[in-house]
Image: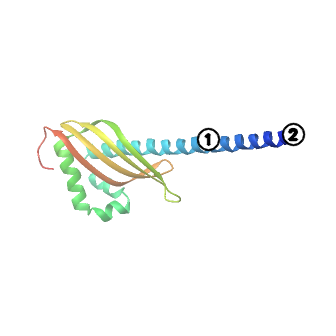
Amino acid sequence: MSACRPCAESAMNMTARVALVMICCVVLASCGLRRSQITAEQGVKEFHALLDKGQYDAIYDGSDDSLRRTWGRADFVKYLSDVHSRLGKAGKATTRGFQVNATTGQGTEVALAMETEFQHGLAEERFVWRVTGDHAVLLDYRADIRRSSGPTTV
């Protein structure tokens, strides 16, 4: 019976090692996913800075091909212009929800639901970004205006 005890201890040690490796993998993956979320949130700040300056073409030009296939330049620029003219400058943006999808070789896709207080109102914005390293590229943008004291052109 004592001959089985080392086998049992060895099996327990192996199980503990496998569990530790799995925990480390989960922790490392969650750190990477959190880093992608932070990068996407930085993308929102940069988007708002360009929106506030009326640089809608720069937003369009910096977006992913998939956005440009969905939106023609003129339509997207008009949409952004309408959102900006109705809401004014962007203020505090709070993340209300997010989804992170890691893909092999194509970066990480991050969808953010933001509640943004603008100069003349409140909007729920939905951003989808492709994050590669510390760079976010816009895949999609939508604004649902909840409250506005600005013009009603959107």
The amino acid marked with disc number 1 is Ile
Of 30 and 88, which appears nearest the observer?
30
Task: Look at the numbered disc 2 and give the secondary structure of its residue.
Answer: loop
Please indicate whether residue 34 sits to the left or right of residue 143 in the image. right
Counting from the top left corner in percent of width and height, residue 104 is at 53, 58
Asked which quadrant contains residue 10, the reply is: top right
Please indicate whether residue 112 sits to the left or right of residue 24 in the image. left
Counting from the top left corner in percent of width and height, residue 120 is at 18, 37
Q: Which residue is drawn at 69% across and 45% down?
A: 18
Please indicate whether residue 125 sits to the left or right of residue 145 in the image. right
- Which residue was labeled with disc 1? 23
Tally the marks. 2
Of 53 and 134, which appears nearest the observer?
134
Asked which quadrant contains residue 68, the reply is: bottom left
Counting from the top left corner in percent of width and height, residue 119 is at 21, 35
Which is nearer the N-term, disc 2 or disc 1?
2
Please identify the residue farthest to the front as the structure is shown.
Answer: 1
Label 1 Cα crowd, 10 Å radius (few <14 / some 14-19 / many 20+): few
Please identify the residue farthest to the left as the structure is shown.
Answer: 152
| Position of the N terminus by quadrant | top right
Counting from the top left corner in percent of width and height, residue 6 is at 84, 40
Q: Which residue is drawn at 25% across and 47% down?
A: 143
